[in-house]
Amino acid sequence: MEEKALWSGRFDKAMSQDTLEFTSSLGTDVALAFYDIMGSLAHVRMLKSCKILPAKDADTIIDGLKKIVDDIENGTFEVNPDLEDIHTNIEHRLTDMIGPDGGRLHTGRSRNDQVATDFRMYMRDMTLDAVNALDNLIDSLITISEKNGDTILPGYTHMQHAQPVTLSQHMLAHAFRFDRDGERFLDAYSRMNRCPLGAAALAGTTYPIDRDMTSQALGFSGPTNNSMDTVSDRDFVAEILFCASLTAVHISSLAEELVLWSSQEFGFVEMDEAYSTGSSIMPQKKNPDVAELARGMTGSVVGSLMSMLVTLKGLPFTYNRDLQEDKRPAMEAMYTVTQCAMMMASAAKTMKINKKRMKESAKAGFMNATDLADYLVVKGIPFREAHGIVGAAVKYCVKENKDLESLTLDELRGFSASIDDDVFEILPLRKCVERRNSYGGTSSVSTNLQRDHLMNNLTIREEFVYYQTEVIEDCWDRLLK
Ligand code: ARG
């Protein structure tokens, strides 16, 4: 190992090869290269403006950093595995290019505030990507809902037929979960969007730096408030990973349903061939692997949240090398959850819906029993008593192998003299669905409102994501000018 570490001054010996390999973070933080340079450009421009660095030196550094960005974009930037992380790699490259003046870049800065800044910028982008993918998934659920206002299927509790619902309502139920997930991500985004740069190693710096200036240059909403908190704070990672975990749990619930619904027993949906796989031995098979994998990947996403929390537990102030373990789980989880959302959006959008099968299934299980009880209540019978009357009618139907709708008026009146001809207007499943027009219910009046609500939220999020993306790109353009 020939390369010198940034900190080798007080050492007589070089680091052993196995220590280098054990402590290196290059395998993950190479993904931070671009953000690292943006952070450095903001820092050096600030040093120049505050007259901490002479303009000439600052300009040489700026030119050098810009060349490294070109190299990264052209794919010609080579990382040196003998240097322990991306920050060291970039600083070395700069010094190779412009000479010892490159060493002035680190004035008033530490890798502790540097890495915290880089990672926040990285996680900002990953969060915006995840929200875009989620919104796309919500969009496909809304489309299915729009087309299936009249598709009736069983609504379940305890996995037993409970009351009829529309597929429209059912898909919107999933969509509202994802809507909250999107909102939660952006909520955490706003808390994460504060700039650590200037906290230095842990206690701030003696140089007359301008933290507002660097914060603004990097598109943050302001600098963080306490230097010690700043270099040890990975709340933003844990919080975003919680958002990702709950999203993954919600995705797995949708995925599980599609797997179940594609089974021969249900036959409610058929996944498109483009989103299915076959079996190497059973020629007849068509498997819903996309949904199965999305369900399965939840494990690693939730695992990354656990990993981050346990890494943070019991850490003393301030920076500890343990914190380096934040990147891999977070990077993997954000990638996974975004991919899952994208794939589930496509799989759901292209699946075939078997409306007939859903309807058939909805006919079983006396799902209009509550409606009959409600009917008796309107006729003046107390609900508890009505419940008992309908229970007796259901028992009779089970014995006679009939359903409530097919009983004659005489048969029905055998259970209660309050039942009249108009009962046949409330028993059809379509009527059961449409009469549930309370706010949030399964009627089409309600599902139309729900879709409006979701679309409104989508627009608000789209605008937020668009605005943030513009702000960030604007910063990059300015820094690279
Ligand atoms: N690779 C390190 C990390 O990701 C960078 C910060 C190193 N700081 C230090 N004091 N050794 O956390």
Image (tube, rainbow, N blue to C red):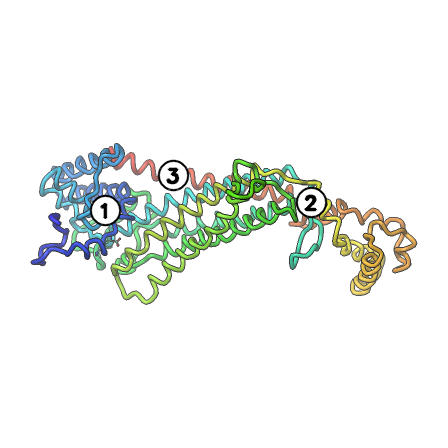
In the rendered structure, which amino acid carries the disc numbered 3?
Thr
Inter-mark Cα distance, 1 to 2: 55 Å
Residue named by callout 1: 86
Cα distance in 3D space between marks 2 and 3: 43 Å
Pick the front one: 282 or 121: 282
Neighbor class of circle 3 (other Cα within 10 Å; few <14, some 14-19, many 20+) is some
**Residue tagged 3:** 469
Instruction: Name which residue lies at 64% across and 46% down.
Output: 264
* Vertical placement of residue 353 versus 418, above or below: above
Task: Give the secondary structure at mark 3.
Answer: helix
Q: Which residue is mark 2?
A: 358
Counting residues from the start of the chain, the first of labels 3 and 1 encountered is 1
Q: Is residue 45 left or right of residue 133?
A: left
Where residue 382 appears, x then y in whole percent? Answer: 81, 63
Dot placed on the residue nearer the N-terminal end, 1 or 2: 1
Which residue type carries mark 1?
Ile
> Which numbered disc, 1 or 2, marks the residue closer to the eye?
2
- Front residue of 217/298: it is 298
Is the residue indicated by label 1 positioned so its CB lies within 8 Å of ligand 1?
Answer: yes
